[in-house]
Image (cartoon, rainbow, N blue to C red):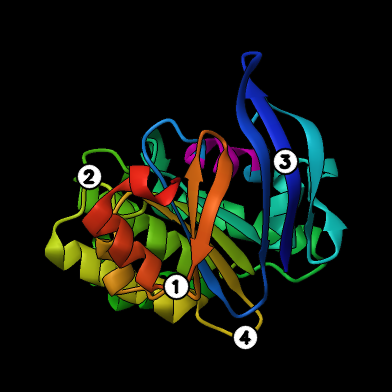
Amino acid sequence: MLQIENIHATVADKPILNGVSLAVPAGEVHAIMGPNGSGKSTLAYVLAGRPGYAVSEGGVTFLGRDLLAMEPHERAAAGLFLGFQYPVEVPGVSMLQFVRESLNTQRRARGEPELSGAEFIKLARSQAEALGMDAEMLKRPVNVGFSGGEKKRAEMVQMGIINPKFAVLDETDSGLDIDALKSVGAGINRIMRAPDKGVLLITHYQRLLDYVEPDRVHVLQAGRIVRSGGPELAHSLEREGYAEAAA
């Protein structure tokens, strides 16, 4: 579904990724773990097409298409979703307005009919309820005044509404308490656990993987994958640290 081949990438002319290769088949969740500065967020931004992240070597295919040749909005319309480590605030724009425009823009790009206002409100309320989020919060400006847990819940609601084919989730567990972690983990499983979907889950810690069990775990250090394994690898990293993983 997602095939990353020997990706090298720089940020402000500084090499960050140094030959990352990774394949995520449909129906699987893959976790990427690693210390600070290892290149995890850079990989996420490269996949999403964030400006300033230059790929100097390698390639990425998504559902058989050249992902790097696509503009960010084209990647989104093709079914790629990026969950941010630190969701941004957008004053003056309600969550409902923001997500409805995002969804219908993608539907237009795919040649699908737009959702009416009533259809969208029904969908948004059902997704908010499933994540344990008060639907009234969707009327507030995007993430403004939200706690860390509320921002992540809101992002999961957004993912549920958009219903992507593939989600790249960058440290979704950051800033979450135990209850929010359970809720977000359940949301990921409910929305993205399907034979025709895939997830690349980026995290520092094993705790989120208690709720979203990965099919594979990869360790990223110094811009390259140094080790891969099953779910047990995450427990090993929790006990031994990243230094042992690269040994």
Give the left or right position of residue 12, taking residue 212 as reference.
Answer: right
Please state which amino acid type lies under the numbered disc 2: Phe
Query: Element at badge 3?
Result: strand
Give the left or right position of residue 66, taking residue 208 as reference.
Answer: right
Q: Which residue is mark 3?
A: 7
Distance Cα–Cα, label 2 vs label 1: 29 Å
Q: Which residue is mark 4?
A: 195
Comparing 185 with 140, the one in front is 185
Q: Which residue is mark 2?
A: 146
Comparing 162 with 149, the one in front is 149
Q: Quadrant of the N terminus?
A: bottom right
Q: Which residue is situated farthest in the left direction here?
A: 178
| Mark number, residue 214 | 1
What are the residue bounds of the magenta stretch?
A: 40-46
Distance Cα–Cα, label 4 vs label 3: 26 Å
Rendered location of residue 189, percent (x, y): 41, 78
Distance Cα–Cα, label 1 vs label 4: 14 Å
Query: Element at badge 1?
Result: loop
Rendered location of residue 128, percent (x, y): 33, 70
Q: Are marks 4 and 3 in contact (CB under 8 Å)?
A: no
Q: Is residue 229 above or below residue 170?
A: below
Distance Cα–Cα, label 4 vs label 2: 33 Å
Q: Is residue 41 magenta?
A: yes
Comparing 200 with 19, the one in front is 19
Q: Which residue is situated farthest in the top direction here?
A: 13
Query: Element at badge 2?
Result: loop
Query: Element at badge 4?
Result: loop
